[in-house]
């Protein structure tokens, strides 16, 4: 309590000054906006500061949190100014939004807040653009009680940035306790600076909240042995938030965390309360998910059939849209056998957002900058996600190795499902994928820490393979976007060249390792 009171000396003036600046730059009465922004900042920064203090209050984590908050709030404000004059001439970007979902949901939240009646209409799917209603309800509550005089979209951006900051510090604390300080720091920095997470945290989207709620659950699971009561509260808060915002993600997250928790424990016996604690939220999440999807499917064979039909329809629909909107993809599908169409789209989705395309694309400059940064972030993380399997298999402790293998498998299943669900779309696919960012960050951290300790050469080889991919696809996109007819080749030729040179790199590396191992054995025998 004493530390909190001491921190209020800087939290209170900071909240008042930043709140006043946000209010003066935004619409409506300045004093109403000032009170609204300042109160939210005061509560949010105080919560983050308390978590930071109990994490050791290091300058490194302080800088991490400052950047996490500043980048998200700053980008959200910048986009609202830059997109109307310099973005694409669409209703969404003319209103200062980069995601159409954010624009539609936020507009409806303001309409709901200013209309008479209950805000629980947010859960009425017949009139709601929000599939689950949770964020729509929170947004309308914010507008009705904190901003009744004017529509202030920055309120939701500020809330998302603050919740993201809580997710960052919780992910750092949980990872540090589970795997050590170096791994925890890498996880924290990835959570704070990953471009896709920053972009979503700068928008009125569900994903920053989902990422934070999963971090809460993970933190509770990691600290279970230390304090079950407090851990239960964190787990319950995380599950409650996930159920409110997306029951489907809630069910998946509970299963992922429960299996990891079981594998990482020394005692593998499952008690009755563990079945209840895991099965209860999963069943509730499944029920809410089915209720949210009711009416969107035509199958009458029960809830499982309806769910499978919804997923199959969504995947096929998104794939069809992608094919119709892409001329080069139509040419590929004319050559590929039909059974390979969906695997090709899934592979294309894993590559999204495609960095060479973002660099060569003659888009308006705000969207081009955003696309390049998103691509750089994903293509920096992706090699570590692939390479992490090698570092995991080198773990000698069987229990620890199985727990890591589960995180690797769960992360990659989620990545594949995200690509399938979004049909390889360059916007929906990455935002679905980033929901499990904490697991992906953990895998990257484990791989990086192990590689630096062992100086293993395979990370460099995977990076070289990625370099080949970027080089050849960079050439292909450059020729395509500049209309260089003489330099254009079929995309399947480009893919074949990438596969060939990648195989050369990997096979050469493998042969070199075998040669060195043989020389080391002969040298040892000679002694």
Image (cartoon, rainbow, N blue to C red):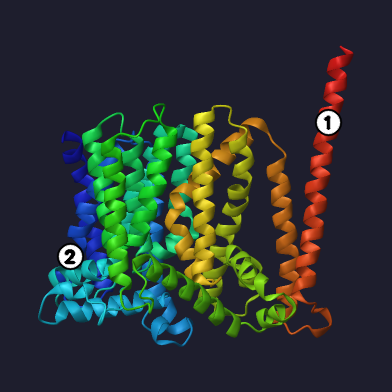
The crowd level at tag 2 (other Cα within 10 Å; few <14, some 14-19, many 20+) is many
Q: Position of residue 26 (x, y in %)?
A: 26, 74
SS class, disc 1? helix
Q: Position of residue 80 (x, y in %)?
A: 37, 75
Who's the residue at 81% across and 47% down the image? 507
Who's the residue at 54% across and 27% down the image? 397
Q: Is residue 207 left or right of residue 183?
A: left
- Quarter of the rendering containing residue 32: bottom left
Instruction: Give the distance between the C-alpha atoms of the residues marked 1 and 2, in whole angstroms.
Output: 66 Å
Q: Residue furthest top?
A: 527
Q: Name above or below for residue 357 compared with residue 516.
A: below
Image quadrant in which the C terminus is located: top right
Circle 2 residue: 36
Q: Residue furthest left?
A: 117
Report the front residue among 53 and 467: 467
Who's the residue at 75% across and 67% down the image? 495
Among numbered discs 1 and 2, the one appearing first in the sequence: 2
Who's the residue at 41% across and 26% down the image? 266
Whether residue 430 is visible to the viewer of this picture, yes or no, is: yes
Whether residue 69 is visible to the viewer of this picture, yes or no, is: no
Q: Name above or below for residue 413 compared with residue 233.
A: below
Residue 516: numbered disc: 1
Q: Quick check: marks 1 and 2 in contact, CB under 8 Å? A: no
Image quadrant in which the N terminus is located: top left
Q: Position of residue 240 (x, y in %)?
A: 25, 54
Q: Position of residue 93 (x, y in %)?
A: 42, 81
The crowd level at tag 1 (other Cα within 10 Å; few <14, some 14-19, many 20+) is few
SS class, disc 2? helix
Report the front residue among 143 and 469: 469
């Amino acid at each position: 309590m004493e530390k909190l009171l001491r921190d209020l000396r800087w939290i209170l003036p900071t909240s008042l000054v930043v709140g006043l600046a946000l209010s003066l730059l935004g619409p409506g009465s300045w004093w109403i906006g000032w009170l609204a922004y300042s109160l939210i900042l005061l509560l949010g920064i105080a919560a983050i500061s308390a978590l930071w203090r109990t994490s050791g209050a290091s300058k490194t984590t302080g800088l991490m949190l400052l950047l996490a908050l500043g980048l998200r709030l700053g980008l959200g404000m910048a986009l609202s100014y830059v997109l109307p004059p310099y973005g694409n001439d669409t209703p969404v970007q003319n209103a200062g939004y980069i995601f159409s979902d954010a624009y539609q949901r936020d507009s409806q939240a303001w309409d709901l807040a200013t209309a008479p009646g209950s805000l629980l209409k947010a859960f009425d799917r017949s009139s709601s653009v929000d599939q689950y209603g949770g964020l729509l309800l929170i947004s309308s509550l914010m507008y009705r009680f904190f901003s009744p005089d004017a529509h202030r979209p920055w309120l939701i951006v500020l809330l998302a940035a603050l919740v993201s900051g809580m997710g960052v510090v919780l992910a750092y604390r949980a990872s540090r306790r589970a795997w050590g300080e170096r791994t925890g720091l890498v996880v924290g920095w990835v959570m704070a600076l990953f471009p896709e997470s920053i972009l979503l945290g700068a928008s009125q989207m569900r994903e920053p909240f989902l990422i934070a709620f999963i971090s809460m659950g993970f933190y509770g699971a990691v600290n279970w042995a230390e304090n079950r009561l407090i851990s239960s509260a964190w787990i319950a808060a995380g599950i409650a938030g996930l159920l409110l915002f997306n029951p489907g993600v809630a069910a998946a997250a509970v299963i992922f965390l429960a299996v990891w928790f079981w594998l990482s424990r020394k005692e593998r016996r499952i008690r009755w309360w563990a079945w209840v604690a895991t099965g209860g939220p999963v069943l509730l999440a499944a029920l809410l998910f089915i209720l949210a999807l009711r009416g969107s499917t035509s199958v009458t064979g029960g809830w499982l059939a309806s769910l499978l039909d919804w997923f199959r329809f969504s995947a096929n629909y998104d794939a069809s849209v992608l094919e119709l909107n892409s001329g080069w993809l139509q040419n590929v599908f004319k050559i590929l056998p039909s059974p390979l169409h969906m695997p090709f789209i899934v592979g294309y989705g894993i590559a999204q957002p495609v960095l060479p395309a973002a660099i060569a694309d003659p888009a308006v400059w705000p969207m081009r900058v955003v696309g390049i940064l998103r691509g750089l972030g994903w293509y920096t993380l992706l090699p570590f996600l692939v390479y992490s399997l090698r570092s995991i298999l080198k773990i000698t402790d069987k229990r620890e190795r199985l727990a890591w293998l589960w995180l690797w498998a769960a992360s990659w299943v989620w990545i594949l499902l995200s690509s399938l669900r979004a049909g390889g779309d360059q916007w929906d696919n990455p935002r679905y994928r980033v929901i499990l960012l904490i697991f992906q960050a953990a895998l990257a951290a484990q791989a990086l820490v192990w590689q630096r300790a062992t100086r293993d050469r395979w990370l460099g080889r995977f990076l070289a393979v990625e370099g080949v991919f970027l080089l050849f696809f960079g050439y292909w996109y450059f020729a395509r976007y500049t209309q260089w007819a003489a330099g254009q080749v079929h995309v399947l030729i480009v893919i074949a060249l990438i596969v060939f040179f990648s195989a050369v790199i990997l096979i050469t590396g493998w042969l070199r390792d075998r040669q060195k191992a043989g020389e080391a054995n002969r040298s040892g025998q000679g002694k």
